[in-house]
Image: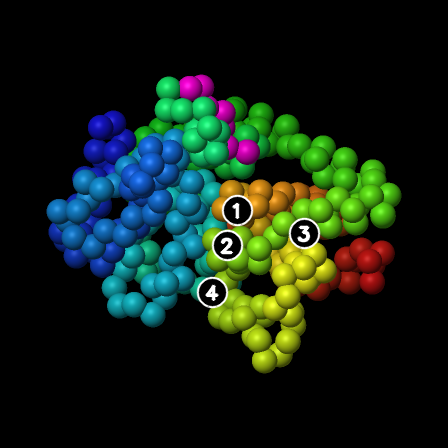
Amino acid sequence: MSDKVKKMQEIAREILEKGEAKVVIGWEKGTHWYLSPPAFIDKPEEVERLVWDDFCHNNLSKYLKDYVNHEGKVAIFVKGCDSRAFNRLLQDKQIERDKVILIGIPCHGLKDQDKAKELGENADIPKAKKCVECRYPNPLVYDYFIGEEKALDEVAAASEARDFSDVEAIETLSPDEKYEFWNKQYERCLRCYACRNVCPACSCRECIFDQTRVGWIGKANNASENQFFALTRAMHVAGLCIECGECERVCPMNIPIMLLNKKLIKDINLLFGPYDAGVDVDGKLPLGHFDKNDPEEFM
């Protein structure tokens, strides 16, 4: 057991024994060595379940929505992306800051679960795609902190190297080629809504796609309906996506969902200036306020 895991368990045990929180949300080992799903600990004697390893992918802030109406506080472990998601929920007034205890833990990049399954436990497993371009490995907000922050020069280098080449490659295609590309992607979509369910930016009380009486989308599973779902969801989280990549990671059909999100991030940066969701809680959302100087080319 690493020192970091021992410290996690010590803090969690102390919080529960003192009654400072009703539950601690962290990660535990799953059914396979390459899986570390969320753990919900409400008894001090169960803190030994908590782990920190290369497969603690889940953005835990998403689960805070389940405790909005519960009495007492919730304690939660946050990586850099989890803390950005937490800030986004604060901005949307989905949670109250004083009802959550944040335990920050710096992340040096997690491993690709699919590659781990394919290559085996003793192989040199590459980083998860979502971690390769991460620019916020350190938690941005916390009450406790475990470990050492990633060096700021490393973070700055990652920030300067932000890569939109995959988006630009799609932008060079003709309209017909773009349609063919995305049609092939969403012909495979199962409409399982895993991407929506895991996304911390999807925080509506009732999702548009659950409103069956209104008929926003049909029940038929075909490329047209699937594309409508994908584009609507992408536009809905525009300016809100904290780039945790969870939507793409959990997609059972390996659809490049983040490619759509990155396109919108790129365009927002171009039209409204550089913006990273979930970094500045008090900052204005680029699509959340009106300014007479806003560009009008798209209107």
Query: CB atoms at circles 2 and 3 under 8 Å apart?
Result: no
Does residue 269 sit above or below 137 in this rendering?
below
Q: Nearer the viewer, mark 2 or mark 4?
A: 2
> For the residues marked 4 and 3, what is the alpha-carbon distance in whole angstroms?
36 Å
On residue 214, which mark appears? Answer: none
Q: Earlier in the sequence, mark 1 or mark 2?
A: 2
Going 65% across and 69% down the picture, which residue do you hit?
A: 217
Question: Residue flagged by tag 4: what amino acid is it?
Answer: Lys
Query: CB atoms at circles 1 and 2 under 8 Å apart?
Result: yes
The residue tagged 1 is 252
> For the residues marked 2 and 4, what is the alpha-carbon distance in whole angstroms?
24 Å
Quadrant of the image containing the C terminus: bottom right
Task: Report the magenta residues as a range.
Answer: 123-129
Q: Name the element at disc 4.
A: loop
> Can you give x and y, in whole percent of width and height, for residue 267 in the image?
73, 47
The residue tagged 2 is 194
Asked which quadrant contains residue 78, the reply is top left
The residue tagged 3 is 187
Question: Residue flagged by tag 2: what amino acid is it?
Answer: Ala
Q: Earlier in the sequence, mark 2 or mark 4?
A: 4
- Horizontally, residue 238 falls left or right of residue 146, namely right
Report the magenta stretch's main SS.
Answer: loop
Q: Can you see residue 15?
A: yes
On residue 93, which mark appears? Answer: 4
Query: CB atoms at circles 2 and 4 under 8 Å apart?
Result: no
> For the residues marked 2 and 3, what is the alpha-carbon distance in whole angstroms?
16 Å
Q: Which of the two residues, 42 or 143, is positioned nearer the viewer here? A: 42
- Circle 4: is it few (<14), some (14-19), or many (20+) Cα within 10 Å? few
